[in-house]
Image: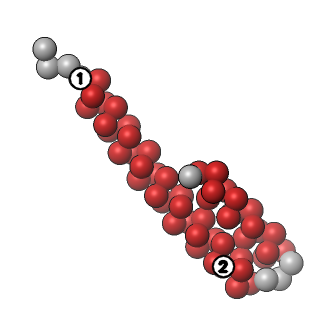
């Protein structure tokens, strides 16, 4: 998912350089959403790993 976010970020930069503002804005928005989803899933997986690592027995 982080790869997709970086891909859309690169598309946004290239579109911005060539003057396609609408495409650049849309790609940047998609990249931001994907990055936030990536961060949330990363934090959830780290918490799950920490909880799973603790043994009650």
CB of mark 2 within 8 Å of CB of mark 1? no
- Element under disc 2: helix
Spot occupied by residue 52 in the image (x, y as percentages of width and height): 27, 28
Task: Say the numbered circle drawn on residue 54.
Answer: 1
Residue 9: x %, y % from top left? 68, 63
Residue closest to the far top: 57
Q: Residues within 10 Å of mark 1 (few under 14, many from 20)?
A: few
Q: Residue at x 56, y 52 (%)?
A: 1
| Residue 44 horizontal side relative to residue 34, left or right | left
- Residue at the spot of label 2: 25
Secondary element under disc 1, as helix, strand or loop, is: loop
Residue under the point 79% across and 75% down:
15
Quarter of the picture containing the C terminus is top left
Measured in 3D between alpha carbons, the distance from the residue under mark 2 to the one under mark 1, in whole angstroms, is 44 Å
Q: How is the image coloured?
A: secondary structure
Number of marks in picture: 2
Judge from the rendering whether residue 53 lies leftward or rightward of residue 43; answer left or right. Answer: left
- Give the residue displayed 58% in from the left and 70% down from the top: 30
State whether residue 49 is above or below residue 42: above
Residue lying furthest right:
18
User: Residue 27 location in percent, x, y?
Assistant: 66, 72
Residue 35 vertical position relative to residue 15 in the rendered view, above or below: above
Dot 2, how many residues are within 10 Å of its Cα: few (below 14), some (14-19), or many (20+)? Answer: some
Q: Quadrant of residue 13?
A: bottom right
């Amino acid at each position: 998912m982080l790869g997709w976010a970086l891909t859309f970020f690169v598309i946004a930069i290239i579109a911005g350089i060539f003057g396609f503002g609408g495409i650049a804005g849309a790609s940047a928005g998609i990249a931001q959403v994907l990055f936030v989803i990536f961060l949330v899933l990363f934090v959830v997986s780290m918490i799950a790993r920490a909880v799973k690592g603790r043994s009650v027995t």
